[in-house]
Image: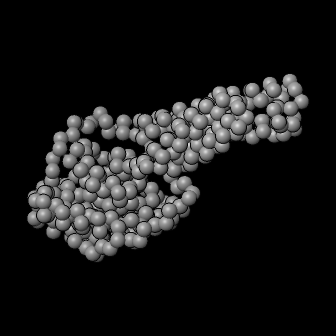
Amino acid sequence: TGGFRRAAEPRMSLWPTTLIEFWGAHAAAWALASGVVSCYALGASAWAVAGAMAGLASTSASLAVLLARNKEEAGTVLSLSGMLFFAGLTALLHTGIQTLAVSASGVGAVGALPVRRSFMVLGVLRKLRSWHALLALGAACFALKSSNKDRLFAASRARPIGVHLPTLALVNLDAGAKMGSELGAQLAEEAARREEAGEPALGVANLGETTPLAALQSFGSIHPQYRVMVCGGDGTVSWVLADIDRLGKAYRPTVAILPLGTGNDMSRVLGWGKFFRPSFLRARLEALGRARVALIDRWDVSGTLPDGQSRVLLNNYLSVGVDARASL
């Protein structure tokens, strides 16, 4: 087991960095705006408007809290919920625009608003309507994409059977998300807990101090059957798969992925997600016993390659040019 130390806690960002946070920011903004309008309507004794806006404020606030507490990527159900929420807001804005347009064309003012300001408000509302219609369409497309992402492997997957095997975690500290150090410390604590509880072993190897091949040989000499959990990005997965080939043994361990890289393409396709949060480590470890085994295609690539190579094994994609330079 390599040495790990916990990384400093990252500072909380007020700017959304994921799709879930982006949707949650919209819901929070609507909760605040609806609450303000509801208070204004109460002061004007517009009870029906006040009640409707209060209901919208509470719904938006509940959705904002739900999205803020969600730690996984947007799945099908959550994306459909976002689609319905934004579609409802689009319909609400459309109704408001129609009502305001009729009032503005019939009289010289809308309530306390002069005609010129009324048309300014109409312009803002129309832009908001278009924006929320695009958000609803985007959420619908994301739900469709999420529902179909595992179709490639679904036909060949058998029902999962919970089998508890020793697990070797290979952690790349230099992977794109730079969470390897913190994750390695958590894995070391979990390994100690399992040893005390008499559960199947969890080995942790720091790929900054050893190679996957050396770690596989050492762990495999003690455990004839085991799993491998790659904690890194697509490059780390390819590195580990290549070293499993170099083992030259009939038994090849199955490989799971904790996505710590930048693209995490293979992790996403195989159903392990596009990113990983350390707070969900225990759940991911428990999911190993229920995971399905999927076969993937691999290709030989020959030619004039970097580092004097003439042949490499391609697992999921090949990068050239700017994309390859950015990943190094």
Residue 58 visible from this viewpoint? yes
Q: In this view, does 228 lie to the left or right of 52?
A: left
Residue displayed at 78% across by 39% down: 121
Which quarter of the picture shows residue 187?
bottom left
Q: Which residue lies furthest to the right in this view?
A: 108
Q: Which of 144 and 157 is in front in this view?
A: 144
Which quarter of the picture shows residue 15?
bottom right
Above-or-below relation of 259 to 175: above
Q: Residue 114: percent from the left, percent from the top? A: 87, 37
Q: Residue 303: percent from the left, percent from the top? A: 40, 61
Residue displayed at 32% across by 39% down: 153
Which quarter of the picture shows residue 27?
top right
Q: Residue 147: percent from the left, percent from the top? A: 41, 35
Q: Is residue 126 left or right of residue 155?
A: right
Count of all numbered marks drawn on residues in the image: 0
Residue 248 visible from this viewpoint? no
Colour mapping used in the image: one colour
Residue displayed at 22% across by 36% down: 158
Above-or-below relation of 14 to 60: below
Q: Nearer the viewer, residue 50 or 115?
A: 50
Q: Residue 325: percent from the left, percent from the top? A: 50, 66
Above-or-below relation of 30 to 229: above
